């Protein structure tokens, strides 16, 4: 736990200042895993569950839209996440790390991704 606290105080902010946010997020997640393992496991489980639910919902909506367009003789193609990512990222960024989700939920904010 001492190393995790030291990492949060020194190395995580350093990674952020150096512009390597992926490493910063990984360090934060690892520190949370050792400082509060129950919260970490709870968050990982729930985030993955919600992600699966969202993916299934989107797949159902896409299939329904395809069927409706086809029955109406409208030619269209669905966009992939790669073609719509930049505008969506500006409007509704996904959580980069478990720690950010945890901070938001413990500060009384809305911890749902994309909020």
Image (spheres, rainbow, N blue to C red):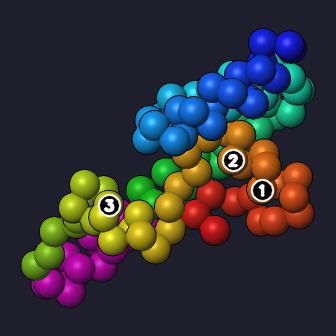
- The local secondary structure at tag 2 comes to helix
Give above or below for 2 relative to 109.
Answer: above
Q: Which residue is drawn at 41% across and 64% down?
A: 89
From which residue to which does the magenta span run? 60-74
> Tag 2 or tag 3, which sits nearer the N-term?
3
Residue 57 appears left or right of 79: right
Q: What residue is shown with label 1?
A: 104
Q: Residue at x 20, y 87 (%)?
A: 72
Alpha carbon of mark 3 to alpha carbon of mark 2: how far? 21 Å
Q: Are marks 2 and 1 in contact (CB under 8 Å)?
A: yes
- Quarter of the image for the N terminus: give it: top right
Residue 72 appears left or right of 107: left
- The local secondary structure at tag 3 comes to helix
Q: Which residue is drawn at 21% across and 61% down?
A: 83
Q: Do the residues labelled 1 and 3 touch (CB within 8 Å)?
A: no
Q: Are marks 3 and 2 in contact (CB under 8 Å)?
A: no
Look at the magenta stretch and give its main secondary structure.
helix
Q: Residue 51 at what x, y percent from top left?
A: 58, 47
Q: Residue 55 at what x, y percent from top left?
A: 49, 51
Residue 9 seen by the camera:
yes
Residue 9 drawn in magenta? no
Q: What residue is shown with label 3?
A: 85
- Is residue 42 or residue 1 the one in the foreground? 1
**Residue 100 numbered tag:** 2
Classed neighbour count for the residue bearing mark 2: other residues with Cα under 10 Å, few (<14), some (14–19), many (≥20): some
Alpha carbon of mark 1 to alpha carbon of mark 3: how far? 23 Å
Q: Quadrant of residue 104?
A: bottom right
- In this rendering, the label closer to the viewer, 3 or 2: 2
């Amino acid at each position: 736990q001492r190393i995790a606290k030291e990492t949060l105080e020194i190395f995580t902010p350093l990674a952020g200042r150096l512009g390597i946010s992926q490493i910063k997020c990984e360090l934060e997640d690892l520190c949370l895993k050792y400082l509060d393992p129950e919260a970490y496991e709870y968050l990982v489980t729930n985030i993955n569950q919600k992600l699966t639910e969202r993916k299934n919902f989107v797949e159902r909506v896409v299939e329904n839209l395809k069927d409706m367009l086809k029955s109406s003789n409208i030619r269209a193609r669905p966009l992939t996440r790669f073609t719509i990512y930049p505008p969506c990222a500006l409007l509704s960024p996904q959580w980069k790390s478990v720690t950010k989700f945890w901070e938001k939920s413990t500060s009384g904010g809305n911890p749902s991704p994309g909020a």
